[in-house]
Amino acid sequence: MNNSVLRTGILAILALAAVALYASAFVVQQTQYALVLRFGAVQSDIREPGLKFKVPLIDAVTYFDKRVLDLDLPVQTLLTADRQNLEVDAFTRYRITDPLKFYQAVNNLTLANQRLASFTNAVMRNVLASASRDAIVRTDRADLMSRIQHEVNRQTQSLGIEMVDVRLTRVDLPAANSQAVYQRMRTEREREAADLRANGQQRAQTIRAKAERDATVIRADANRQAEELRGQGDADKNRILAAAFGKDPDFFAFYRSMQAYETGLKTGDTRLVLSPTSDFFRYFNDPLGRRNGAPATPPAKPAQ
């Protein structure tokens, strides 16, 4: 009877010891910090991973992530040094460096994110307000982000937080300003296009006028050369005819009469009121052009 009670008691004690050991042991991962709290007071600050122990049923363990955490900031409208409104969208990356300070200052990640967002927004406003729009968008963006990160780090040291990075993901004009800028850009492009078209039309008119002037000059030169050649041809013709007339006046008279016949007696309704014995028809009666035995004389050529 006594052995059975003793055995039962030992088993009960071992079970209680096992339960107490299980309740007092906890594991800290490599990615975690741990704080052992007793009735809300911090008993130990654990920063190394491994198996740890606490007083069961009295102590509580709070874990914090030691990895880099992300925080997206809400879009806010800022006024730059050149009086331009900009919508800025940013995010931050931070890590907890001192879990004890972190717990004492903000207690949890939700409150820490609120405080960090407040700090970052205030610093961002102050830093970007001293810069122009072009500096924020293009020239000094990296330097401005570095200044923001440095200033936020200075303010968050009391929170046990280190700011790893600050990035401006989007910097843009408000919708109303964007529309006004777009309209102004469109007006400028239309003005430039109108100037280009006007310059093109002016050059086209200049080229067209020059081409017309050159064509007129070319036609005038061609007409002059044609008249000169025609005059030269007529002169040569008259010279040849004069030489032919000097050599054989009868043939020349006959040739001139044939030309007169060709001109006066055309195909169709040709009517001439002439005497049959007129000199105009003398080659019809006599191939030699003689009339009543008279020697042949060249008839006058009718007007054409």
Image (cartoon, rainbow, N blue to C red):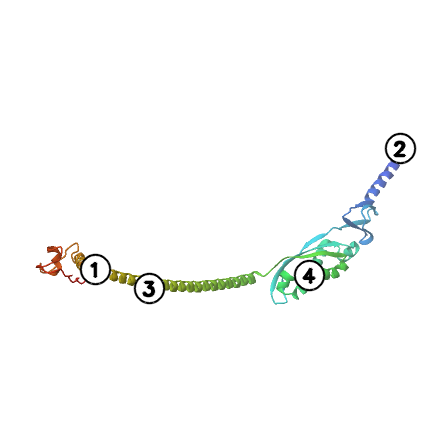
Identity, as a three-letter code, of the amino acid under mark 3: Arg
| Disc nearest the viewer among 2 and 4 | 4
| Disc nearest the viewer among 1 and 3 | 1
Identity, as a three-letter code, of the amino acid under mark 2: Ser
Name the residue carrying label 4. Answer: 143
Q: Image quarter for residue 290?
A: bottom left
Q: Position of residue 196 (x, y in %)?
A: 48, 63
CA separation in Å, label 4 and label 1:
111 Å
| Disc nearest the viewer among 4 and 1 | 1
State the residue lying farthest toward the front: 247
Q: Position of residue 48 (x, y in %)?
A: 81, 49
Name the residue carrying label 2. Answer: 4
Name the residue carrying label 1. Answer: 247
Identity of the residue drawn at 78% across and 57% down? 101
| Disc nearest the viewer among 4 and 3 | 3
Identity, as a three-letter code, of the amino acid under mark 1: Lys
CA separation in Å, label 4 and label 3:
79 Å
Identity of the residue drawn at 70% across and 56% down? 165
Identity of the residue drawn at 33% across and 62% down? 225
**Does label 2 or label 1 sit earlier along the sequence?**
2
User: Which label sits on residue 224?
Assistant: 3
